[in-house]
Amino acid sequence: MIYQTLDDWDSWDYKPAVAYVVSHMGLYTKWLDLGSPLKLFEVQLPSWTVDIRKPPPDRNHLPWLQADVMNLPLEDASFDLLTSICVLCHVGMGRYGDPVKINAVDIMLKECGRVLMSGGRFVCVPGPVADQTSFQDHRHSIYTVEDLTLRLINAGFAAPDASEF
């Protein structure tokens, strides 16, 4: 997992997550991206993209599944790589037409664990991380590192190494 802080928000940079994906592409055969801006993946595109929104006109030729990340219509253990860039901070807030749910992040993380193959990798940029968990009027959820760690563990993931924050 790759996290930024609110202090870095003005210079938010997704390159570390994209660099990880690109540098490890030979290791993964089935890649599912959950709602990330696809323009970030210029070198290699995901096997599938899931998004609550319709694909942009220039991407409608790609394997795209318009669906809710809290209820993935996919088989268990069907992908060896999942990516999610700035989705955890928006899921369940209704901002993009998804259902409003208080526990949306927990539901999404459990769905990610369900569709991820054993030994697979979940590369996630959750959005802003701060000293206190808060929610900003259908715009962003902001989590602490401790809160995100607990949510990951409760969803069945191993605790991330502190160096991954």
Image (cartoon, rainbow, N blue to C red):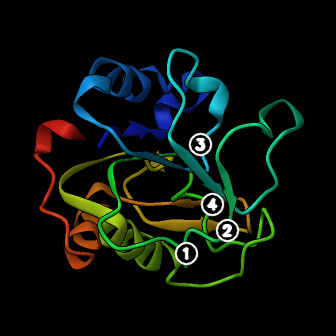
Q: How many marks?
A: 4
How packed mark 2 is, by other alpha carbons closer than 10 Å (few <14, some 14-19, many 20 or more), is: some
Q: Nearer the viewer, mark 2 or mark 1?
A: 1
Q: Amino acid at mark 3?
A: Ser
Mark toward the viewer: 4 or 3: 3
Label 4 and label 2: CA atoms lie apart by 15 Å
Badge 4 or badge 3: first in the primary sequence: 3
Q: CA distance from mark 4 to mark 1?
A: 20 Å
Dot 4 surroundings within 10 Å: few (below 14), some, or many (20 or more)?
many
Q: Is residue 110 above or below residue 46?
A: below
Report the disc number at residue 90: 4
Label 3 sits on a secondary structure element that is loop
* Mark 1 surroundings within 10 Å by alpha-carbon count, few (fewer than 14), some (14 through 19), many (20 or more): some
69 relative position to 146: left or right: right
Sequence-first disc among 1 and 3: 3
* SS for dot 2: loop
Q: Give the Cα separation between the discs numbered 4 and 3.
A: 11 Å
The three-letter amino acid code for the residue at tag 1 is: Pro
Residue placed under numbered mark 1 in the picture: 73
User: CA gap, disc 1 to disc 3?
Assistant: 18 Å
Sequence-wise, the earlier of marks 2 and 1 is 2
User: Where is residue 64 drawn, in percent x and y?
Assistant: 67, 50
Pick the quarter of the image with the N terminus: top left
Q: Which residue is mark 3?
A: 36
In the image, taking residue 37 as reference, residue 75 lies left or right, namely left
Residue 52 appears at what percent x and percent y?
Answer: 72, 63
Depth check, mark 4 against mark 1: the one in front is 1
Query: Which of the two discs, 4 and 2, sits closer to the camera?
Result: 2
Residue assigned mark 2: 67
